[in-house]
Image (cartoon, helix red, strand yellow):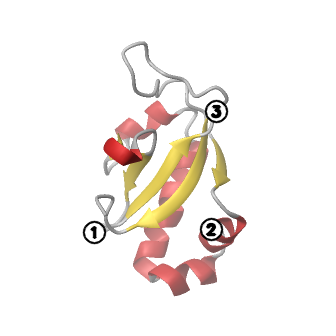
């Protein structure tokens, strides 16, 4: 999949080993890098359904975003960035057609 970032600052942190370790610690940095590699290697979002850890669509005021488990309570928050966003007739994303994502944040709690 193609990966974009919400901001250049976030992109620099998540793609620079020393900045990533400084901000999140060694273990969390390793997990974030692994998740970014999995996103990059996936052909479509549906490929992530078979990886360890949970990847799911969020609801409420975070509708149209997704959460990918990292370590402990940390989550990688992202959205589909295809144009147009592939939707199922009954609502929600068509995971088989999502091929571009935008990383929005690394959060501790998606319910805040």
Quadrant (top left/top right/bottom left/bottom right) for the N terminus: top right
- Direction right: furthest residue: 8
* Residue beneath the point at 42% across and 74% down: 28
Q: Secondary structure at mark 2?
A: helix
Q: Is residue 93 above or below residue 68?
A: above
In the rendered image, residue 19, in percent from the top left (x then y), is placed at 61, 82
Residue 83: assigned label: none
Q: Secondary structure at mark 1?
A: loop
Asked if the residue at tag 2 contacts the one at tag 1, i.e. Cβ–Cβ closer than 8 Å, the answer is no
Residue 82: assigned label: 3
Q: Earlier in the sequence, mark 1 or mark 3?
A: 1
Q: How far is mark 3 from mark 2, CA to CA?
A: 20 Å
Quadrant (top left/top right/bottom left/bottom right) for the C terminus: bottom left
Instruction: Give the side of residue 32 with respect to residue 101, left or right.
Output: left
Front one among 91 and 56: 91
* Residue beneath the point at 43% across and 40% down: 48
| Other residues around mark 1 within 10 Å, as few (<14) / some (14–19) / many (≥20) | few
Q: Earlier in the sequence, mark 3 or mark 2?
A: 2
Residue 72: assigned label: 1
Count of labels in the image: 3
Residue 10: assigned label: 2
Q: Earlier in the sequence, mark 1 or mark 2?
A: 2
Can the viewer see residue 58 in this picture? no
Q: Is residue 1 above or below residue 27?
A: above
In the rendered image, residue 30, in percent from the top left (x then y), is placed at 47, 71
Callout in the foreground (1, 3): 3
| Other residues around mark 3 within 10 Å, as few (<14) / some (14–19) / many (≥20) | some
């Amino acid at each position: 999949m193609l990966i974009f970032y919400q901001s250049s600052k976030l992109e620099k942190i998540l793609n620079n080993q020393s900045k990533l370790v400084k901000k999140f610690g060694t273990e969390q940095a390793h997990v974030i890098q692994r998740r970014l590699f999995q996103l990059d290697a996936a052909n479509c979002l549906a490929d992530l359904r078979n990886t360890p850890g949970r990847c799911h669509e969020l609801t409420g005021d975070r509708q149209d975003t997704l959460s990918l488990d990292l370590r402990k309570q940390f989550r990688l928050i992202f959205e589909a960035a295809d144009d147009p966003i592939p939707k199922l007739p009954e609502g929600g994303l068509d995971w088989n057609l999502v091929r571009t994502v935008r990383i929005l944040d690394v959060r501790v709690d998606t319910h805040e």
